[in-house]
Amino acid sequence: MTLDNRSRRIVVGYDGSPASRAGLARAAERAGDDGKVYVVHAYTLPHDWIGTPDYQVLLDVVLNRAQACVKPLDDDLQGINWELEVIADRPATAIAGVAAARDADEIIIGTRGYGRARALLGSVAHELIHLAECPVTVIPERAVERAEERAKALVAS
């Protein structure tokens, strides 16, 4: 429970990656039995395609990919109170916007951690930390891989 005695509201960014699946599991755990998880999947389209004859075709492709990405959530979140938000916007902006609109207690995202070059250009996690009005938990994909390695080692021993 939060200090104002309401159920926890957790926003999680989801792109289907192992780190975002780990974030989803953490969000479900943090929300608890009486909380709610808001799953945000954002997509963007090149702005220079707007108004072209193929724009709708491209939009359909992007939306179909988004639907395929989030389809497994029904199985992954059984027994959890959750809601899906598929938003056409930059990921950090979409996630921060949902968190603000839902008065979230926390945002949880996974990060692929592409390295220093990506860090110089900016990442979703970095941008989100500057946009968010609530705490942000970032789960690096390296941490997910290490946890999987430990689990395999325990099974093997």
Image (cartoon, grey):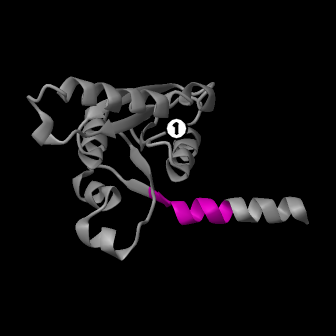
Residue 76 left/right relative to 97: right
Give, as a single range, the part of the protein colored magenta: 138-147
Which residue lies most toward the left here?
51
On screen, residue 136 versus residue 76, left or right, reads: left
Category of crowding for the residue at label 1, using alpha-carbon neighbours closer than 10 angstroms: few (below 14), some (14–19), many (at least 20): many
Left or right placement of residue 72 versus residue 92 in this view: right
**Residue closer to the observer: 107 or 155:** 155
- In magenta stretch: residue 50: no
Q: Position of residue 44 (x, y in %)?
A: 25, 40
For the point 24% across and 67% down, the residue is 121
Please identify the quadrant where the C terminus is shown: bottom right
Q: Give residue 34's position: percent from left, percent from top.
A: 54, 28
The answer to whether residue 107 is seen in the rendering is yes
- Judging by the rendered image, the residue that carries numbered circle 1 is 31
Q: Position of residue 21 (x, y in %)?
A: 55, 45
Q: Residue at x 44, y 43 (%)?
A: 15
